[in-house]
Structures are given as structure tokens and as C-alpha cells.
Amino acid sequence: MFSRALTTALLLLLTTGCVAGNAAAGALLLPMRVPVVGAPPLAHERFSVTTRDGIALDGWFFTPAAPPRAVLVLVHGKDINRQHFVGAARRFVDQGLAVVAFDQRAHGRSTGEFVTYGAKEVGDLRLVIDTALKKWGRELPVVLVGESLGAAVALQTAAVEPRVRVVVAGAAFADLTTVIDDHAPAILGRQAKEKAIAVAEQAGGFHVADISPERAARSITVPTLLLHGSEDTYLPLRHSLRIYENLAGPRELVRLEGVDHVGILLSDQAWKAIDRFVGEALHRELLVKVNRTNSPAPVGARTSSR
């Protein structure tokens, strides 16, 4: 989840224009790694998959008692880990969904040093989806639920991943350039900022201008729920409004009164909206599947029995 740490990181980058640590990472790219402590208090299976660039992604599978009707992947924000979603995992397992909670790269028990705000995380999430569908069934619809950084990754993934059928995005940012502009210290000039961004891009292997959930929204045709707190001063509501205006499919934006950035998925009003939206979207998905299965063969089509 975004925090004041990003502002501090930007200040360091913009004032020094240097890389931190072992001369590889710009401060903008280094999340605070919160350790995973213990195990969740519900039945689970630990898994690990390795990305093409050698990052080991660590996570948990939660399997419902009956055959699952969908796979739901929980995507956490910056500076936290998958344990943040244990309560949500229990909630969805009780609703008959198979649930995945994993640590994004450079977080929790996953390896990696840098966060790239979606440039590499989209591929990570698609790999996790592959792994989950191999376990529970390739025909199952996929639901993504993310917050902050995780919401931005979920949206960028939904734009390119046809197996995703429902998206829930809490407190997403519209584009990374806006985040940097909003939080860069005002006393610093354009040249210093551009130099700092260039350093971060070289170290992280991506371009800041490419990170845009708002632009990705134009390619998202599946039902998408956006949640944003009225008191979010770090990523104000205008970020979700920009994304909402560009979504190409069924969409809903819920303003959570009195909720700040950190509390985006901690309120009852948020989870009531999520339960309703995901339930209705999966019901429609099931109806489409049934209708497709029961549709009569086209006139002139050959049928055979043996």
C-alpha cells in the first residue's frame, strides 16, 4: 500500500539523483519488506512459482469444501504482504471460491528487490493465475481483488488477460507520473525530477510513463468495481474517477465515506459492496456459460452419434 515512504523515497531520489544500497536500486523502487509471520488460521497450501526473470513468488492456496465456482486472487499493496488478506480469504472460501493470496515481488517471502508498479508485476500475476487454474480447473472464471498498488496491477492485468472475468480495485492510482508529480517536493525543479526518474527507470528496467491503469481501463471489458475513500489524501478520489471514465465494460464506482487510503479494504461498507458486486458478476458469468452450453447447433451444422 502506498505510504509516506514513497514521498520520502522521492525526496531522496530528487535531491540526490543517485541509486541506493548496492548501486542497483533507486529509492523509489525499494518497498518496505514486511515479514510474513506464522501461518493463517485456516486450511491452506503453500506454493511457490518462479518468474521468467528468476523471482520466486510465494503464496497460499485456500480451497473451499465443495468444488470451487471461481478462482479469486488477492493482490496486496505496497509495503505490506499477503497476511493482510487472510480475513478476506476466509470470507471468499466460505462463499465457495478458491482463493490465492501471494506476496508480490520484493514483498513478504517473495524474492526480488524492486517494485515496478505493474511493468513486471502484471506478468507475475498472470503466472499466479496459470498456477491456480492448473490446480483448480482451467475453465473457472478468475476474479481479481487488489488495493492500491495491487489494484493498479489488477487493472493492468485485466486489460491483457482474458481469463479475468471480474475486477475489484480499491484506491488505485490513475498513472505513476501523476503520483510522482503529486508527491515530489515543490522546491525541486523539472531537471532534478527528470534526472531522478531516469535513474529509477534504468535501475528498475521500466518506463514510468508506461504505468497507467487509466490507459489500461480502455481495454477492460469485464465488470469492474472501483472503491475509493472520501478521505484518501495520498491518492485522491480523482484517480479512480479517471479510471472509471475510461473503463470499456460494466463499471461501478463506490465512494467510501470517511475512509482514508490505508483503510480502503478495512470497512464494512467496502466488503458489502464487494460481496454484492462479485456475487452478481459471477452469477451473470454462470448464466452466460449455461446459455452457451445449451444453445442449439447452428442450422446446417453436422451432428453425429457413435
Image: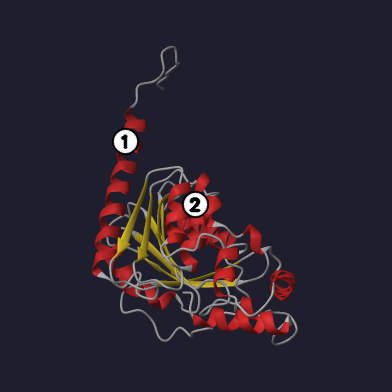
What x and y, as percent, mark residue 230? 34, 67
- Tell me which corner region of the image, top left, top right, bottom left or bottom right, holds residue 175: bottom right
Mark 2 is on which residue type? Ala
Residue at point 50%, 68% (across, down): 149
Out of 39 and 17, give the one closest to the viewer: 17
Residue at point 60%, 60% (across, down): 211
Circle 1 sits on which residue?
Answer: 290
Out of 260 and 44, give the one closest to the viewer: 260
Mark found first going from the N terminus, 2 or 1: 2
Q: Secondary structure at mark 1?
A: helix
Residue at point 49%, 52% (across, down): 158
Residue 237 is left or right of residue 277, and the answer is right
Q: Secondary structure at mark 2?
A: helix
| Above-or-below relation of 87 to 65 | below
| Above-or-below relation of 287 to 282 | above
What x and y, as percent, mark residue 13? 67, 80
| Above-or-below relation of 142 to 150 | above
What x and y, as percent, mark residue 288? 34, 36
Residue 29 is left or right of residue 99, and the answer is right
Circle 2 sits on which residue?
Answer: 158
Mark 1 is on which residue type? Val
Q: Does the rendering let one see residue 113?
A: no
